[in-house]
Amino acid sequence: MAKVLVNRPIAPDVFRMEVEAPDVAKYRKAGQFVIVRPASGRERIPLTIADADREKGTITLIYQVVGRTTAEMSLIEPGGEMADVAGPLGLATHIEKVGTVVIVGGGIGVAPSHPIAQAMKAAGNHVISILGARNQGLLILEPEMRAASDEVVVVTDDGSYGDKGFVTDALRRLLDAGRKIDQVVAIGPPIMMKMVSLLTKEYGVPTLVSLNTIMVDGTGMCGGCRVTVGGETKFVCVDGPEFDGHLVDFDEMMRRQRMYVAHEAQSRAAFEGGHPCRMEQMAGEAHRG
């Protein structure tokens, strides 16, 4: 069992959880993930480690409520417990001093971008982070990313905060301005990573993408996370989660990822039908306070 210290919403349907996991906190590296279960007998899901505190023995997980498991996680009160937090798993991000690194985080992808930005900066790189969201209310971890970066550019689809546009617009401006960019790391929705990779291929900039959103069991046994990279079949949870963005077949990945969207929605609806929405409860408490 793992004690939950913090579990609160930071954006619509997005929660920040801090959980006691001293061994994971001690050994984790940027890019790695854990497998969690909210309760015994429940589904196992992989979540990237967004941050860790070795002294406190805690890790930070950022998760989006999509199906039943994440909905159940959102109901755990501080002081409660998770049945399992196993890890760290997955191959760590290759970190070295290359010069200028641009970290592109879109939506919930900002969370796994955070430890990579931290590690790249610690290695002596000049880190430029581009953070994207549909609107200001959906932007997450901006203060943390500013602390982990030398420069930060924020873009929103609707222009409600930062520059109006997409992350690719901001990246293209940097490239067209003649900035020497030695590496790009892109994490977010598959379509975003695809468009970033197409752009950087045009400019000849090496690009890493994280395909963590397609993972299921995290051990390579279920085969649900198989993707085609450079014409070869890879399993994201054991061969990744990071790959050369110029070699990933994103169209195939997106087709596979869409297969269970309806099932996840049905599972969440069935679960929440018997449970009050915690976000609505918290909003009501704040209003009464």
Image (spheres, rainbow, N blue to C red):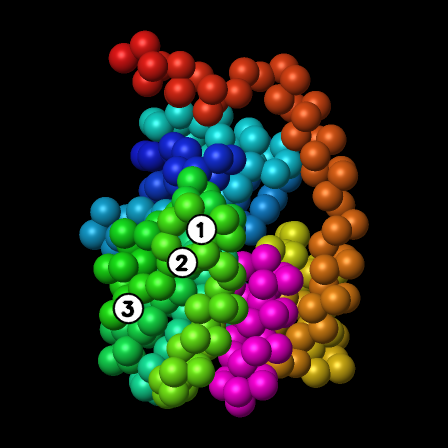
The amino acid sitting under disc 2 is: Asp
- Which label belongs to residue 69? none
Residue at 34 percent across and 14 percent down: it is 287
Magenta residues, start to end: 186-212
139 versus 33 height, above or below: above
Secondary structure beneath label 1: loop
Residue at 55 percent across and 29 percent down: it is 72
Residue at 47 percent across and 39 percent down: it is 14
Query: Can see residue 139?
Result: no
Label 1, label 2: how far apart the Cα atoms are? 6 Å
Does 230 sit left or right of 28 as displayed?
right
Quadrant where the C terminus is found in the figure:
top left
The residue that disc 2 covers is 163
- Which label belongs to residue 159? 1
Q: Where does residue 286 sit, x and y in percent of width and height?
A: 32, 18
Q: Where does residue 215 sit, x and y in percent of width and height?
A: 63, 56
The residue that disc 3 covers is 151
Secondary structure beneath label 3: strand
Label 2, label 3: how far apart the Cα atoms are? 14 Å
Q: How many marks?
A: 3
Label 1, label 3: how far apart the Cα atoms are? 20 Å
Task: Residue lying at the far top in this picture: please name it.
Answer: 288
Does 94 sit left or right of 209 as displayed?
left
Quadrant where the N terminus is found in the figure:
top left
The amino acid sitting under disc 3 is: Glu
